[in-house]
Image (tube, rainbow, N blue to C red):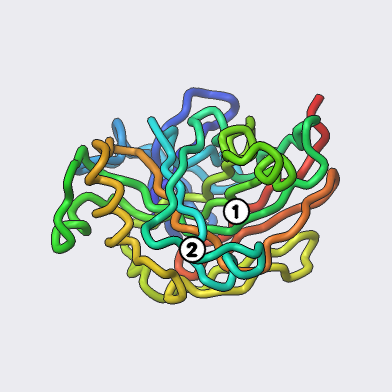
Amino acid sequence: MRIARFSVREGSPAAGSVSFGVVEGDPSQPDSLVVHELAGHPFGQPQPTGESYRFQDVRLLSPMLPNKIVAVGRNYAAHATELGNDVPDVPLTFFKPSTSVIGPTENIAYPPFSSDVHHEAELAVVIGRMCREVPLDRVPEVILGYTCANDVTARDIQQREGQWARAKGFDTACPLGPWIETDLDPSDLAITCTVNGEPRQNGRTSLMIRSVAELIVHISEAMTLLPGDVILTGTPAGVGPLNVGDEVAVSIEGIGTLTNKVIKRG
């Protein structure tokens, strides 16, 4: 199932499943992309309300508003090498605040304190239930699904300050979307990034040093994960600069494409 978070005509956010079909009561456009509204939150057993909307009539929002985003650095050897870093002995984790999250088609606001902002295409894992100290064989039980992410990074600030809070945590630095895919094997997916249509990153999740399951085991040893929390699993090689006016797109096989434009912060 593809679960989206959306609004209609500036109404309140709602959850919905995205599929090909027809809008309830309007069979005039068969086999078009439709959002079927779900009652309540998507955890557990979401039920349809009976309301449905044409995809072009809704505004997609970030698929989750996470309590926390736990990100993993240098989880692809080639990316560590391109930045002149060693592969860490244990997963290198850091936080991005919830205030950094934006959804598909929302704008990345270039921070005025940086002159070197980079894209980082990543597979994001959405946690589906509260959990702690998850055994390796039970990791699938705590995952709701997967989405695309862009770990936008002020590279000059990261290098200058020696820690990553401002460099990776500024407002709009964590685009997520377009939806959550619940039925997916994350072990070998193509992951790409383009800027203004130009290919920048092209990798596969099979190249991750530590798998999704290993990352969740490691992170949950230290902290409780809550429904809706997001884990960013690292970026393949090819990261590079973004400039005001650029359009950056992150695509992951089996999920879809997350597209955002870069604007000057007002």
Rendered location of residue 193, percent (x, y): 65, 64
Q: Determine if residue 218 is in view.
A: yes
Cβ atoms at labels 2 and 1 below 8 Å apart = no
What residue did someone put label 1 on? Answer: 258
* Residue hosting label 2: 31
* Residue found at x 52% / y 58%: 122
**141 shown above or below 24:** below
Q: Is residue 46 visible?
A: no
Q: Earlier in the sequence, mark 2 or mark 1?
A: 2
Query: Which residue type carries mark 2?
Result: Asp
- Vertical comparison of 109 with 248: above or below: above
Horizontal side of 189 relative to 90 (left or right) equals right
- Counting from the top left corner in percent of width and height, residue 248 is at 71, 55
Left or right of residue 221: residue 72: right
Q: Which of these two is toward me, 24 or 127?
A: 127
Q: Secondary structure at mark 2?
A: loop
Position of the C terminus, as image quadrant, is: top right
